[in-house]
Amino acid sequence: MKIQDARGHLREIVIGAGALIAVLAVYMFSGPTVYSGVTEVSMRDDGFSPAVIHVTRGTRVRFFNEGSFWHWPASDPHPTHDRYFGLDPLRGLAPHEAWVFAFDVVGTWGMHDHLDPSLRLRVVVVGDSE
Ligand SMILES: [Cu+2]
């Protein structure tokens, strides 16, 4: 192999590595998708989808029971549901039933399925300017 060829390969490798690092940096530093207005969380028999959601203050989240069992979205802690007052439909939702809640308080809110508290959701509410 000539020295000229070796330099050419080295240059390609350096450019390739640089491109890879740039793509990773964009991926790592781009924040999560933040929803506004109305958005939906599915309640499935194996858990919430998505399991973490970011919304702006005032966003209405529609909890839709997509499963074949009843589900009950509620604020932590179980069973009192009083960390975020009102974040509780006060009853389970039948399959295909929905319940809408407007998140007006900035913060990170843990939620669970009251009928199966191992199923968890985290709602991150950010201010309008964030
Ligand atoms: Cu509960």
Image: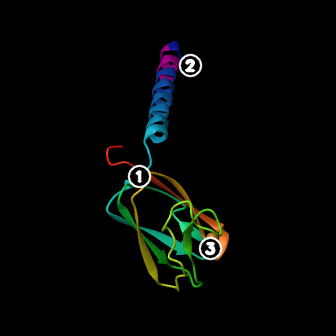
Name the residue: 43% across, 51% down.
106
Q: What whole-number distance in Å separates the C-alpha atoms at marks 1 and 2? A: 49 Å
Label 1 CB, ligand 1: below 8 Å? no
What is the number of the mark on residue 114?
3
Q: CA distance from mark 3 to mark 1?
A: 27 Å
The answer to the question of whether label 1 and label 2 lie on touching residues, with beta carbons closer than 8 A, is no
Q: Nearer the viewer, mark 3 or mark 1?
A: 3
Which mark is first along the chain, 3 or 2?
A: 2
Label 1 sits on residue: 33
Instruction: Say few, some or many: other residues with alpha carbon within 10 Å of mark 2 (under 14 / 14 to 19 / 20 or more).
Output: few
Q: x%, y% of residue 74?
A: 55, 69
Query: Mark 3 belongs to which amino acid?
Result: His
Residue pictured at 52% horizontal, 82% vertical? 93
Label 1 residue SS: loop
Assign the magenta stretch its main secondary structure: helix
Check disc 2 and report the residue beneath it. 1
Question: Can you tell which quarter of the image residue 39 is in?
Answer: bottom left
Q: Where does the C terminus fall, quadrant-wise? A: top left
Of badges 2 and 3, the one in the foreground is 3
Q: Which callout, 3 or 1, points at the residue further toward the start of the chain?
A: 1
Pair 1/2: label in front: 1
User: Could you say where residue 80 lies in the image, as x and y percent from the top left?
Assistant: 62, 68
In the drawing, does residue 41 fall left or right of residue 37? right
Amino acid type at image mark 1: Thr
Of labels 1 and 2, earlier in sequence is 2
